[in-house]
Amino acid sequence: MGMIHTNPITGNFSIVCPSAYLIENGAISNPLEPVNVTGNLYESLKRISGLGNDLFLSPFGGNNPTVVIDGLSVTG
């Protein structure tokens, strides 16, 4: 995980992802250059469209599944 910028009042966030992958037809395809993901935490919670059953230990603590969130902006 790269640098994270957040505004706890508005919920806006920006995350630099140094290792990202293109997903085509539901499968991981190609590695991408570092990308920037931006969105709003409060809106993102409303737009969760999928949860995986692949729990992994986050370096930030806790077990987390893969989460699909619609409507995030990805640029790079």
Image: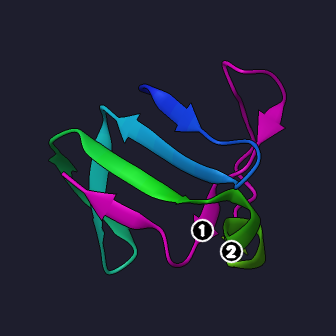
Q: Which residues are magenta?
A: 51-76
Query: Where residue 34 sits: x, y (%)?
Result: 22, 38
Residue 57 placement: quadrant: top right
Crowdedness near tag 1: few (<14), some (14–19) or many (≥20) residues, C-alpha within 10 Å: some
Q: Earlier in the sequence, mark 2 or mark 1?
A: 2
6 or 24: which is nearer to us? 6
Q: What residue is shown at x 65% (from left), y 42% (from top)? A: 7
Query: Where residue 29 sits: x, y (%)?
Result: 22, 60
Crowdedness near tag 2: few (<14), some (14–19) or many (≥20) residues, C-alpha within 10 Å: few
Query: Where residue 3 sits: x, y (%)?
Result: 44, 25
Q: What residue is shown at x 74% (from left), y 42% (from top)? A: 8
Q: Magenta span has 71? A: yes
Element under disc 2? strand
Q: Residue furthest front?
A: 9
To which residue does mark 2 refer?
A: 50
| Relative vertical location of residue 14 with respect to residue 1 in this rendering, above or below | below
Numbered disc total = 2
Q: Residue furthest right?
A: 62
**Which amino acid is tagged 1?**
Val
| 39 horizontally vs 24: left or right | right
Query: Where residue 72 sits: x, y (%)?
Result: 47, 68
| 50 horizontally vs 68: left or right | right
Q: What residue is shown at x 70% (from left), y 55% (from top)? A: 10
- Which label belongs to residue 30? none
**Which amino acid is tagged 2?**
Gly
Q: CA distance from mark 2 to mark 1?
A: 5 Å
The answer to the question of whether label 2 and label 1 lie on touching residues, with beta carbons closer than 8 A, is yes
To which residue does mark 1 refer?
A: 68
Element under disc 1? strand
